[in-house]
Amino acid sequence: MQRKLLPVFVLTLSFLVTPFNPAQGAVKYAFPVVGCTYTYAHSHHNYPATDILAKKGCKFVASTSGVIDEVNRVDKWSGKTNLGADRSGLYVSMIGDDGVRYYGSHLGKIADGIEPGVRVAVGDLLGFIGTSGDARGTAPHLHYGISWPTPPDIWWVRRGEIYPWPYLDKWKAGLNAYPAKAVAAKKAKVGEVPEQVGY
């Protein structure tokens, strides 16, 4: 698979993307974990996200086509400091062609060639499930979040602003479900940089 590195200015333009209108074209979606048995709940502790439990090393793939936004290959989390920005451990976020940010964290490893600005297609390998960050000592899982693009220091938006499970349910059944409208509505309600919710 050949990946094309896009100019960095594309990342700044991602903030200008308007919500995707399904009538404009057929964006395809896929469940973000492949090749493994997995489970997930229709709930999450104190902010909207989904933890997808699967064996360590299971593949984390792009839920849709888009451009890699952020990549963190260094696990800085410490139980002594427990800083919110470090809890994710190794992670990848991408901005889909629908204008939505998709985020997976607690990875054990990030796939080779995954860097900010790289274009990926739906189903492309992004990384492997692990227990990095504050998942250390817990069951391996992918923390999966859906939100809108923000600057890198706004970690509490990146980790999730709407519940992914209704979309995951559809994607695992091979159906398209479009989160852009729900993401735009939540952003309109709380603002681009809302107060931090949860820990």
Image (spheres, rainbow, N blue to C red):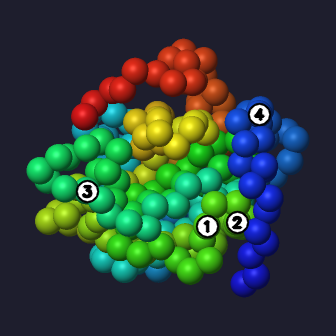
Q: Which residue is mark 1?
A: 115
Q: Residue furthest top?
A: 189
Kindly check if marks 1 and 4 are in contact, taking CB atoms under 8 A apart as contact: no
Residue in view at x 38 percent, y 66 percent: 74
Q: Is residue 186 above or below residue 18?
A: above
**Quarter containing the C terminus:** top left
Marks 3 and 1, the one that precedes in the sequence: 3
Q: CA distance from mark 2 to mark 1?
A: 6 Å
The three-letter code of the residue at mark 3 reads: Trp
**Quarter containing the N terminus:** bottom right
User: What numbered label is drawn on residue 151?
Assistant: none
User: What numbered label is drawn on residue 16?
Assistant: 4
Residue 16 appears at what percent x and percent y?
77, 33
Q: Is residue 11 above or below residue 199?
A: below
Q: Tell which of 106 and 21 is nearer to you.
A: 106
Kindly check if marks 4 and 3 are in contact, taking CB atoms under 8 A apart as contact: no
Q: Residue furthest bottom?
A: 1
Q: Which residue is mark 2?
A: 118
Mark 2: few, some, or many residues within 10 Å (few <14, many ≥20)? some
The three-letter code of the residue at mark 2 reads: Val
Q: Which residue is mark 3?
A: 77
